[in-house]
Image (tube, rainbow, N blue to C red):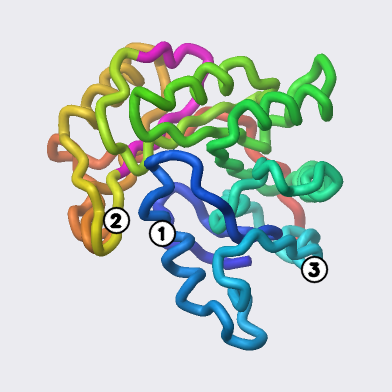
Amino acid sequence: MADTSSIEWTDATWNPISGCTKITAGCDLCYAERFAERFRGVPGHPFENGFDLTLKPERLLQPFQWRRPRRIFVNSMSDLFHKEIPTAFIDAVFDTMEKANWHTYQVLTKRSSLLVRYLRLRYGAGKAPSHIWLGVSVEDAQNTVRLKHLKAAQASIKFVSFEPLLASVGLVDLTGIDWAIVGGESGPKARPMDEEWALEIRDQCLRDGVAFFFKQWGGVHSKAGGRLLKGREWSQYPKVPTPVQIEA
């Protein structure tokens, strides 16, 4: 758990799970894998197992330690809906998010069909609470099916991370989506993002009334290209109820 984060759209990170496996082109140069593998084999290090999928039950209750409300990116170093994560462990993560409800949780996945299935099982005909934001990653037009899954998901707040944006996503229907993030890839072999791809998404957000957040251009370092798009920063967030303030 990190009390602060360099990720522009969140305040903190919480990783009750670390490690993942690659499924599409957006995973090819995974920043989390690159970071974790640096510490493989270091005794006692949180990433002693490198980027192997690792459950960390000792971290399940960490959000209760923070009394001031935060936006918390859940599993920045994994994917909560990885098929090898037991449903009971996902339940435990959701239990914490539901009970420590003064925070806002940002859950992002590439396993969008598993997200839909899980929410249906957990909430029946209802929806996830509005302080738990559920989102999918979409890196190109080939993977816009994840957006279709998200639109069908029983989530109160839905968001899409177009990062790393590797190609045009084309015309997409963003109605029913609350928030869109766009970002270029970062790292030693980062693939460049075309301005037109980003503007295409921005314009469709404006058309469909979706909050738009331009995270970064990317490059060798994540901050290398800055985050101005057509001369301005875009840092919009979805409109949701204010989290309950808990006294320290």
Residue 134 place in picture, x, y as percent: 61, 34
Q: Looking at the image, is 235 positioned above or below residue 176?
A: below
Q: CA distance from mark 2 to mark 1?
A: 8 Å
Per the image, the residue denoted by label 3 is 58
Residue type (three-letter) at the residue carrying disc 3: Glu
* Camera sees residue 81: yes
State if disc 1 and disc 2 touch (CB < 8 Å).
yes
Q: Nearer the viewer, residue 214 or 190?
A: 190
Magenta stretch? 172-183
Asked if residue 216 is positioned above or below residue 134 in the image, the reply reads: below
Q: Is residue 5 above or below residue 213?
A: below
For marks 3 and 2 on the same chain, the one whose residue lies earlier in the sequence: 3
Identify the residue under disc 2.
186
Q: Badge 1 is on which residue?
A: 31
Q: Amino acid at mark 2?
A: Ser
- Asked whether residue 99 appears in the rendered view, the answer is no
Q: Residues within 10 Å of mark 1 (few under 14, many from 20)?
A: few
State the SS at label 2: loop
Q: CA distance from mark 3 to mark 2?
A: 31 Å
